[in-house]
Image (cartoon, rainbow, N blue to C red):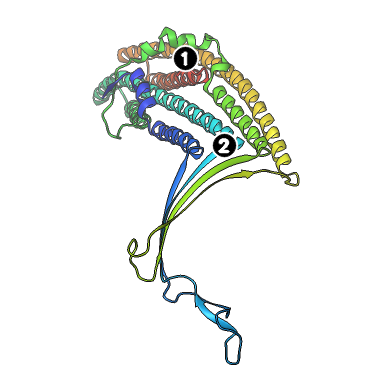
Amino acid sequence: MNISLQQALDMAARQSYAVQTSELEAEKARHQVKEITAIGLPQISGEASLSNFIDVPTQLIPNFFVPEGPGVPQYLPAQFGVPWNVTGGLALSQLLFDGSYLVGVKATRALADQSENDLARTRADAQNQTAKAYYGVLAAEEGVRLTSEGIPLLEKSLREVEAMMQVGFMEQTDVDRLNIQVEQARAQKRSFEQQANVARMLLALTIGIPQGTPITLTDKLADLLNDPAETALSEQAFDAGGHVEITSANTLVTLQEYEMKNEKMKYVPSLGGFVQHQQVWNGPDFDPGGEFSFYPTTLWGLKLSVPIFSSGSRYHKVQQAKLTLKQVEINRTATEQRLIAQAEQIRSTARTANDNLRTQERNMALAKNIFDRTAIKFTNGSAASFELTQEQGNYLLAQQAYVQRLVELLMARADLRKALDLY
């Protein structure tokens, strides 16, 4: 896969695993809005039942058939009902007015907006992680390139010293010193190669592709470092009002306002209506619709629920909702101030990282020049192997420091872009 930084960011916003999960959560919220809305729409339910009395219930009734007399029972057993009973019916209910329902519908829509805000924040996080992984690969590959440049020269010097030792002009100590430097350079190269592999794995994870997929980065490190848009980030103005976290904080305030309205609406009566229709059949034998007919039962009605007295329960719930509203409003203000301070802090970090990189870039160039001159002197016999290995060690340290400063700058730019909400 050949991929540029922008393509990687687009893929992360579209298919990273965290974004996929957040998109499903947003879809659930949209269905939740429809679910709550459906509560206020007509509800129809059906019911059917079949019963058979093995023993029909028997009751004693006063004996008003036979005049009282000797041997005449005062009560007679009587069965009311027949063994078989079949009932089928439909019930329609409709919520006519409920203040909590009206507030709830608006609240669920705000909740859906909140899930969209969460999705936007997840996308920004995924893009931030992707940018860092992409930069990590480029920085590690730059480290591989830098260390690879010095290894051939060291190996050449080692071969020359070994040859000179054979004829008695050098000692084994000189050979050993150069061997140590060659191995240190190779170890540093392997370390950078491993870092590049790990960064590629992280990049694959953040853009949502299988591990092991070959990835080739098409953007060059120098182009990204000197990109005017990236360089200008540290001077770009910050608008906290449009930041995704402020949008999320505003939505939380809106949700809490609805919660407070919902508690107040519990003082208001609610009204519902219903219609029920049943068809009932009874018979001594199971023969529905035969000798005996189905008989209908139909009714409709209204149900009014009026809250009267709750011993202060509703009042205290309203007060709690008001206090929670003040809390989320304070949190919104705190979030705005935190974002402003955070943006300025990361802006300062990016400026410092840029200065440190340029300084270390000059230091590395000086270390390389010193090493190159010492290598020439060593070849000419005017410098000892100790001097050569010392300057090579200094150059390796300068390379490590340069790559570290490079990583710090790239990570600071990625964090600054996130702080400014530019993903």
Left or right: where does residue 72 sit relative to residue 89?
A: right
- Amino acid type assigned to the residue bearing label 2 in the image: Tyr
Query: In the figure, 7 relative to 319: above or below?
Result: above
Left or right: where does residue 242 sit relative to residue 138?
A: right
Residue at left 50%, top 40%?
Answer: 39
Q: Which residue is mark 1?
A: 357
Query: In the figure, 301 relative to 65: above or below?
Result: above
Mark 2 residue crowding within 10 angstroms, few (<14) / some (14–19) / many (20+) = some
Residue 102 in the image: state x and y as whole percent: 57, 33
Q: Are marks 1 and 2 in contact (CB under 8 Å)?
A: no
Query: In the figure, 112 relative to 283: above or below?
Result: above
Residue at left 41%, top 71%?
Answer: 83
Disc 2 is placed on an element classified as helix
Q: Nearer the viewer, residue 237 or 139?
A: 237
Report the residue that reaches farthest toward the right.
311
Which quarter of the rendering shows the N terminus? top left
Report the residue that reaches farthest toward the bottom.
70
Residue 18 in the image: state x and y as whole percent: 41, 33
Residue at left 56%, top 32%?
Answer: 107
- Amino acid type assigned to the residue bearing label 1 in the image: Leu
Disc 1 is placed on an element classified as helix
Give the Cα distance between marks 1 and 2. 60 Å
Q: Is residue 355 visible?
A: yes
- Within the image, what quadrant is residue 303 found in? top right
Left or right: where does residue 10 sit relative to residue 347?
A: left
Residue 101 image label: 2
Report the residue that reaches farthest toward the front.
67
Which numbered disc, 1 or 2, marks the residue closer to the eye? 2
- Within the image, what quadrant is residue 255 found in? top right
Earlier in the chain: of badge 1 and badge 2, it is 2
The total number of labels drawn is 2
- Within the image, what quadrant is residue 400 found in? top left
